[in-house]
Each structure stands twice: as structure tokens, then as C-alpha cells.
Image (cartoon, rainbow, N blue to C red):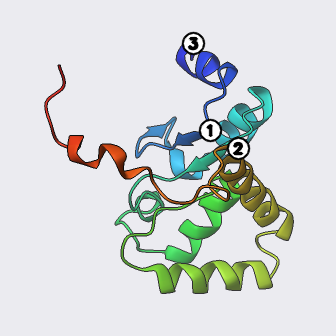
Amino acid sequence: MPAYYDSIDKGVATVMISYSSWNGKKMHANHELITGFLKGKLQFKGFVISDWQGIDRITSPPHSNYTYSVLESVLAGIDMIMIPYNITEFIHELTCLVKKNFIPMERIDDAVGRILLVKFTLGLFENPLADLSLVNEVGSQVG
């Protein structure tokens, strides 16, 4: 854990959850570690992001109970979820879970607040476009 302590102390803005499991619990559904330890004990103020299709892998086979995967990942504390292919399905499931009060609006507000805090801190609203002055250096060998 030393690397996490040090990174959070230095103000890291995002943490990505891994595909791994701990004590039989998929990390993308691990409320104890994401919300309890990372956000609670370590007082991480940035946002937590899923890995690529990470919530799909909560179930076996992957994506076999998508409603459950959305519910568990959001309640675990993941703030931003990488959805490469099924964004319409994700939005539908998340919206239904919020409307039925399975996911409290406070959890959504926390996620949105964390994401906006990072974006404001980075100045993305004042300067939303990339600096293109070094675009010709992309892909070149360094030194």
C-alpha cells in the first residue's frame, strides 16, 4: 500500500480499478476497498474509474447479469465507468436503478462531484482544447 499512500498524499486525481479479485470478491464490486479504504480511510478526493469493460467481468460469464454489475460497481464506489460498446444499455440500467432507489441519488451526486472537481482543478473548463504546439513530436523517439 505504500505507493497508494504516497500517490494520494501527492494529489493523484484518478485511480483505476483492476480486473483482479481479492478474497474472492471482484475489485469492481468491492465496496470495502473502494469506498471504505480508498475514499474513507485514505481520504481520496479524486474519482475512481473502472477498467475497460471491468464491470462486465463482475459476473461469470462476463455480462451475464448486467443490472447486477451496474448496481454493484456504482455502489462499490466507482465514479466513472468505461463502456466501450453498450452505452445505451448502461444508461438504461443505471437510470432504472436510480429511479427505483436501488442506487441513491447521493451516490450519483458524489460521483459527479468528484469528476467535476478533477476537471475544474485541471482547468478543463477554461482551456478545453489541447495544446497542439508539440503535435509533431507525438511518436518520435526521445533523446
Residue identified by numbered label 3: 2
Answer with left or right where residue 59 lies relative to residue 6: left
Name the quadrant of the C terminus. top left
Residue for point 47% across, 79% down: 87
Gap in angstroms between the C-alphas marked 3 and 2: 25 Å
* Viewer-nearest residue: 47 or 100: 47
Instruction: Kindly indicate whether the residue at mark 1 contacts the one at mark 2 (C-beta within 8 angstroms).
Output: yes
Residue for point 17% across, 42% down: 139
Answer with left or right where residue 63 lies relative to residue 38: left
N-terminal of the pair, mark 3 or mark 1, is 3
Query: Residue 86 in the image: x percent, y percent?
Result: 42, 80
Residue for point 76% across, 66% down: 108
Badge 3 amino acid? Pro
Query: Residue 42 in the image: x percent, y percent?
Result: 74, 26
Residue for point 69% across, 85% down: 96
Answer with left or right where residue 18 lies relative to residue 101: left
N-terminal of the pair, mark 2 or mark 1, is 1
* Viewer-nearest residue: 58 or 141: 141
The disc at residue 131 is: none
Answer with left or right where residue 60 lies relative to residue 110: left
Instruction: Kindly indicate whether the residue at mark 2 contacts the one at mark 3 (C-beta within 8 angstroms).
Output: no
Badge 1 amino acid? Ala
Secondary structure found at label 3: helix
* Viewer-nearest residue: 41 or 140: 140
Mark whose residue sits in front, 3 or 2: 2
Badge 2 amino acid? Thr
Image-quadrant location for residue 112: bottom right
Query: Residue 12 in the image: x percent, y percent?
Result: 61, 31
From this viewpoint, which residue is outermost toward the right?
106
Query: Residue 54 in the image: x percent, y percent?
Result: 43, 57
